[in-house]
Image: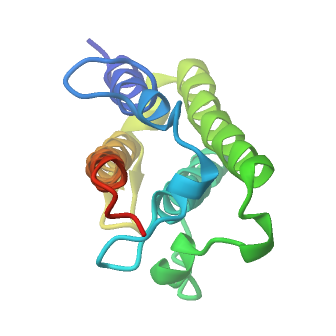
C-alpha cells in the first residue's frame, strides 16, 4: 500500500466514507444554519469549527500544491474559527458546506495526481517532516474535530428535544 492510497483513505474517511465513525458530510447533511451557530461551553459552534477545518485544509492544500512550507507568524488560530455575522443564514451555511466539500474533493484530486516521491519529500522548515506525515496529521486533526462536531450536534439535538434550547 502506498502513502498516497493511505492518505486518500484517511481524508475520505473523515469527510464522506462511513467506516470507523460517521463522516463529516453525513453529520452535517441535515444540520440547519440555526443549529450550526449554537455555541458550546468553549464558545465554539459547529459552524466555527467547520470554518476552522476549511481554513487549515485550504492552507495545507495551498502549501502542498506549492511544494513548500513557509512558517507564517501572522496566523492566529483562534481567528480561524471566526464566523461572518452577516452570513449567518441558510445561504451562508450552504456556501460554507460547499467550500468544505470543495477542499476535501481538491485534496483527493491533488493526492491522486501526486507522485509518491513528493509525499516522501521532507520539509526542513517544518520539523523536517515528510509531506505524507504532514497530510496524515491533517487527517488526524480533521478526525478530532469531526468527533467534536458529532458530540456538539448530539448535544444540540438532545437539548432541543428536551426543550432546553431556550
Display coloring: rainbow
In the image, residue 145 sits, relative to residue 10, either above or below, namely below
Q: Position of residue 159 (x, y in %)?
A: 30, 56
Q: Report the front residue among 63 and 36.
A: 36
Q: Position of residue 165 (x, y in %)?
A: 39, 64
Q: Residue at x 49, y 30 (%)?
A: 25
In the image, residue 135 sits, relative to residue 166, either above or below, namely above
Specify whether 81 is left or right of 17: right
**How many dots with numbers?**
0
Specify whether 90 is left or right of 61: right
**Quarter occupied by the N terminus:** top left
Q: Report the front residue among 76 and 122.
A: 76
Residue that extends furthest to the top in the rendered view of this protein: 1
Q: Report the front residue among 43 and 79.
A: 43
In the image, residue 94 sits, relative to residue 43, either above or below, namely above
In the image, residue 117 sits, relative to residue 146, either above or below, namely above
Q: Residue at x 32, y 79 (%)?
A: 42
Q: Report the front residue among 19 and 67.
A: 19
**Quarter occupied by the C terminus:** bottom left
Q: Residue at x 38, y 66 (%)?
A: 126
Q: Position of residue 143 (x, y in %)?
A: 30, 44
Residue that extends furthest to the front in the rendered view of this protein: 163
Q: Position of residue 157 (x, y in %)?
A: 35, 47
Amino acid at each position: 500500500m502506498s502513502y498516497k492510497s493511505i492518505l486518500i483513505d484517511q481524508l475520505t474517511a473523515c469527510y464522506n466514507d462511513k467506516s470507523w465513525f460517521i463522516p463529516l458530510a453525513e453529520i452535517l447533511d441535515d444540520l440547519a444554519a440555526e443549529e450550526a451557530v449554537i455555541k458550546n461551553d468553549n464558545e465554539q459552534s459547529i459552524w466555527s469549527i467547520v470554518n476552522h477545518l476549511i481554513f487549515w485544509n485550504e492552507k495545507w492544500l495551498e502549501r502542498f500544491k506549492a511544494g513548500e512550507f513557509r512558517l507564517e507568524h501572522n496566523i492566529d488560530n483562534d481567528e480561524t474559527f471566526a464566523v461572518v455575522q452577516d452570513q449567518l443564514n441558510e445561504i451562508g451555511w450552504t456556501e460554507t458546506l460547499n467550500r468544505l466539500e470543495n477542499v476535501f474533493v481538491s485534496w483527493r484530486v491533488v493526492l491522486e495526481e501526486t507522485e509518491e516521491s513528493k509525499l516522501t519529500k521532507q520539509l526542513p522548515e517544518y520539523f523536517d517532516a515528510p509531506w505524507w506525515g504532514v497530510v496524515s496529521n491533517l487527517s488526524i486533526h480533521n478526525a478530532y474535530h469531526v468527533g467534536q462536531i458529532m458530540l456538539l450536534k448530539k448535544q444540540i439535538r438532545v437539548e432541543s428535544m428536551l426543550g432546553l434550547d431556550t
